Image: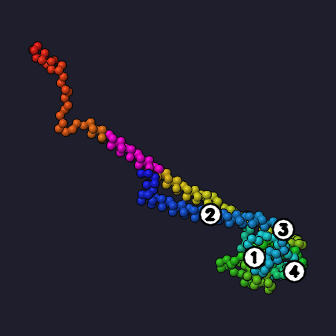
């Protein structure tokens, strides 16, 4: 049976359908892995482009109170004004290098503008209470601040602010707005990069984030190889089936030829044995034999 006819048989059409379905599943999984890889690489590229970029005025990066462009994440922005120290907030459950602690949020009143929330850094949990032992104070008076833009965080599960304290669960800017009796930038805040004047002590500054690109690209290649391997395996099985079919056909043809030869050599039933034609010499020899006797 030829390869084309073999594929048209019901059994092999079923095998082909299974392989195609498997390859489609592999293709979908490969596409998902590729998209995940592209997303991570986009984050890496943005971090490389924005993290150490020159600072721009905060009004240029955030033209409106609720405006935020995801492409501006990590962009340094510069502003001048004063810290609203009395409105300082602590964000709970912020581990750093494996140690529990808090993020220190201080609203910053921009000269002639809105309030921008600044994350000044991290402080550890106190030794005897669920609060920092010390929170370094920001500079007083007129201050020039450079901070990197970050989007506000959503609420997390049932985490809520602790009543009667200045602690909140996440950097949820709508929650911060309730604590600050002024208009704030409600979609983005900033991680502190520098302050001028520089205070004697500051919270621990955050290290540059490390983006784990993971193994998505390797998984993408693996799924493509699985899909291709399925078709190669089917092709191998078909070739083996063809070889076996040809071998069986050759054996049947050889057996048929041998059978025809045996039939041709076998004498017909009821047929007389062939006798040699008698010549004159044979007759004369018989007469001479009879006389001599």
The picture places residue 49, in percent across and down from the top left corner, at 78, 65
Residue at the spot x=78%, y=80% of the render? 64
Q: CA distance from mark 2 to mark 4?
A: 47 Å
Q: CA distance from mark 2 to mark 3?
A: 34 Å
On screen, 159 above or below 287?
below
The residue tagged 2 is: 33
On screen, 204 above or below 113?
above
Q: CA distance from mark 4 to mark 1?
A: 21 Å
The picture places residue 216, in percent across and down from the top left corner, at 64, 61
The residue tagged 4 is: 111
Q: Could you tell which of marks 3 and 4 lies nearer the N-terminus? A: 3
- Mark 4 lies on a secondary structure that is loop
Q: Could you tell which of marks 2 and 3 lies nearer the N-terminus? A: 2
Q: Could you tell which of marks 1 and 2 lies nearer the N-terminus? A: 2
Residue 78 shown left or right of residue 277 in the figure: right
Residue 205 shown left or right of residue 170 in the figure: right
Find residue 260 and report its image quarter: top left
Q: CA distance from mark 3 to mark 1?
A: 19 Å
The picture places residue 17, in percent across and down from the top left corner, at 48, 61
The residue tagged 3 is: 54
Q: How is the image coloured?
A: rainbow
Q: Residues within 10 Å of mark 3 (few under 14, many from 20)?
A: few
In the displayed image of the protein, which residue is found farthest to the front?
280
Residue 28 shown left or right of residue 148 in the figure: left
């Amino acid at each position: 049976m030829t390869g084309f006819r073999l594929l048209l048989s019901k059994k092999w059409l079923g095998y082909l359908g299974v392989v195609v379905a498997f390859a489609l599943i592999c293709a979908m999984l490969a596409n998902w892995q590729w998209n995940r890889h592209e997303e991570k690489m986009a984050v890496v590229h943005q971090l490389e482009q924005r993290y150490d970029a020159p600072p721009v005025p905060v009004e240029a990066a955030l033209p409106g109170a609720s405006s935020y462009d995801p492409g501006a994440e990590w962009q340094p922005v510069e502003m001048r004004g004063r810290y609203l120290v009395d409105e300082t907030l602590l964000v709970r459950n912020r581990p750093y290098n494996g140690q529990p602690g808090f993020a220190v949020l201080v609203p910053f009143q921009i000269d002639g503008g809105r309030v921008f929330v600044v994350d000044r850094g991290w402080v550890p949990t106190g030794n005897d209470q669920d609060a920092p032992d010390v929170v370094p104070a920001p500079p007083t008076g007129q201050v020039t601040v450079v901070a990197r833009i970050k989007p506000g965080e959503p609420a997390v599960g049932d985490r809520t602010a602790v009543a009667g304290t200045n602690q909140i669960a996440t950097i949820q800017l709508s929650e911060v707005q309730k604590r600050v009796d002024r208009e704030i930038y409600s979609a983005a805040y900033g991680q502190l990069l520098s302050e001028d004047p520089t205070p004697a002590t500051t919270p621990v500054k955050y290290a540059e984030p490390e983006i784990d690109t993971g193994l998505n690209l390797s998984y993408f290649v693996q799924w493509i190889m699985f899909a291709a391997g399925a078709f190669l395996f089917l092709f191998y099985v078909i070739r083996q089936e063809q070889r076996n079919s040809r071998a069986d056909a050759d054996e049947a043809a050889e057996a048929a030829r041998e059978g025809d030869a045996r039939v041709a050599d076998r004498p017909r039933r009821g047929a007389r044995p062939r006798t040699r034609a008698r010549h004159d010499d044979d007759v004369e020899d018989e007469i001479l034999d009879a006389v001599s006797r």
